[in-house]
Amino acid sequence: MQKNVSDLLESSEFKSLVVKRGTVSIVLLLLLFVSYYGFVLLIGFNKSFLAQKLSETGATTLGIPLAVAVILAAWLFTVIYVVWANTSYDPEVRRLRALLLGK
Amino acid sequence: MPPVIDQAAGSIQTTLGHPTLPAIVFFLIIVSITLVITYWAAKRTKTTKEFYAAGRSVSAFQNGLALAGDYMSAASFLGIAGMVALKGYDGMIYAVGWLVGWPALMFLIAEPLRNLGKFTFADVVAFRLKQTPVRIASAIGGILTVLFYTIAQMVGSGSLIKLMFGLPYEVAEVLVGAIMLAYVLFGGMLATTWVQIVKAVLLLCGVSVMMVMVLAKFHFSPGELYSAVATQYGQGALEPGGLITSPIDAISLGLALMFGLLGLPHILQRFFTVPDAKAARTSVLYATGFIGYFYIIIPIVGFGAAALIGREVIMNIDKGGNMAAPLLAEFLGGTPFLGFIAAVAFATILAVVAGLTLAAASSFSHDIYVHVIKGGSATEQEEVRASKIATLLFGIVAVCLGILFKGQNVAFMVGLAFAIACSANFPALVLSIFWKRFTTAGAVWSILTGAFLAVGLIIVSPTVWVDVFKNPKGSELFALKNPAIVSMTAAFVVGWIVSLMTKDEIAQQKFEDEKLRTYLGVGAE
């Protein structure tokens, strides 16, 4: 069944698509905020935590793997978003487009 | 046991600062390859869509590399390696900040940007608003951002090339300007994209080889490398030092780095080169991977330089530490490897300036000339001609500004570019995409507030007031080094209040249709 533009915009399917994308974006953005600004605030307020050594004999501090972890986490969030978009968002977009354009 | 390397200051022999045969050969190879690419691209660059957006033919993987190429400047390669070498862990903190904008770019605007835009980010801001005022305001924000970024790049490149090849500063400026103009003028976005790709691959490979060679000196154990650093410079080199003293300052800088990325015109323009929103999204995944990898391995190069070359030797050549990576390259692989790294750094400078020039030219020709002066009705031919004239003019201006600012402290200008980007360009972009009630007046006031507040506050901040104007410490009128937390917030608030005070019926009606395009890509270019 082909829909016209205003029907589609008013449809619960389209609205839930918009809400879903917004939610995923905001949740991932919040996770990014927590990991990065958490790291920054840790440096600001608790330097000694990051300065502690990982082992008795070595010199490596906790701060070094933690900085790497913040970068890896940021990348991981983009992986999560892409996997979500490819498996859940794109099929729904294709379906709604087909409803509208009649293909 | 870590290898004991005792390098008294000055005992190291370096050919740095003299044009060596390997450096010249690598330089000529890179320039010839990129010029051949430009020749190939020139034959495929006739229309505006080809000139500004490479015919939307760039794949997600290619665009990922090109985004990385646009973003990883010589400043981040040589600068962060040097900062880690001299300041230790603080350099690493700084490196992390440069990455975290990328996921935000993906979550918030990568896909809508591709679906709504044509050639410039102003297309997206002005999508449902009144063209003339919004285009002018967006162009002001966009061009200011690019201008400050370019000055920092040009001044940096002049001194870096002087340090590496021994070329006089002015000659270096003209050389960079001339080669990069050749790319942009003849090959447009297609050539610029491939120059970015070549440069990104060379840079990633070069730095990877350096990392492996450094680790090889320490039995492939990073722990041994850190022990060597701690033995020579104390445990403090591996601990947070003086970079973050005021958390609010750090948050403000973090906001500028994170959301400034979402307002950098030359980065945003790259999203119009891919075929669809899915490719736009995937290209950010690749870019984040490449850039993240780069910022993870750069500190190893920096620490390696501290342990193997020594801080004193590095500072003897350049106080800022910029030559840490080239010196390390020479130590590890002799003159040929130094030549390679120097040539890669040069290619990095060329590529970044080319991307900036294309973005500035697009803003002049597409936003100002076509939409403001010609009322949106220029012919294809007129627009291409205008964009080439704009490219040429901006290239010349860049070289002149580079020479004008010779020897000036311009380090703050990158921070300023990010501050303007996150205060002027980013709020208007996000509000225009996601907020129905956003009006033309709201957009214009938001952009102008963000731009002028960012510039004004940075002038009276310690960064410029004390460090550049040499006023006494403590006499600054604004305490934060980066104004983002104030100027970005103000831009959002002003955009919100002015929109509520004004009515823009057409903008609201168009919002529903815009949603169809934002989310489903219906009607996207």
Image (cartoon, rainbow, N blue to C red):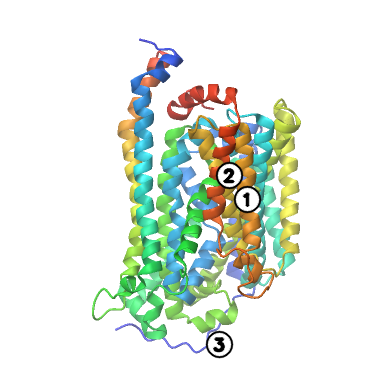
Q: Chain of mark 1?
A: B
Quadrant (top left, top right, bottom left, bottom right) of the C terminus of chain A: top left
Residue B145 badge: 1
Which quadrant of the view contains residue A61? Answer: bottom left
Q: Are marks 2 and 3 in contact (CB under 8 Å)?
A: no
Badge 1 local density, few (<14 within 10 Å), some, or many (20+)?
many
Residue to which mark 3 is pinned: B10
Separation of disc 2 and disc 3 at Cα?
Answer: 48 Å
Q: Mark 2: which amino acid?
A: Asn
Q: Is residue B353 visible?
A: no
Chain letter of mark 2 equals: B
For disc 2, the neighbor class at 10 Å (few under 14, some 14 to 19, many from 20) is many
Tell me where residue B111 appears, x and y as whole percent: 46, 36
Does the CB distance between marks 1 and 3 fall below 8 Å?
Answer: no
- The residue that appears at 66% across and 41% down in the rendered structure is B139
Residue denoted by label 2: B425
Q: Residue at x 41, y 16 (%)?
A: A100
Q: Tell me the CA gap for discs 1 and 3.
A: 41 Å
| Nearest to the observer: residue B392 or residue B414 | B414
Crowding near the residue tagged with mark 3, few <14, some 14–19, many ≥20 C-alpha atoms within 10 Å: few
Tally of marks: 3
> Could you say where residue A50 lies in the image, as x and y percent from the top left?
33, 70
Front-most of residues A91 and A11: A11
The mark closer to the camera, 2 or 3, is: 2
Left-right relation of A83 to B483: left
Label 1 and label 2: CA atoms lie apart by 9 Å
Q: Amino acid at mark 3?
A: Gly
Q: Residue at x 44, y 41 (%)?
A: B108
The subunit carrying tag 3 is B
The residue at the far left in this view is A56
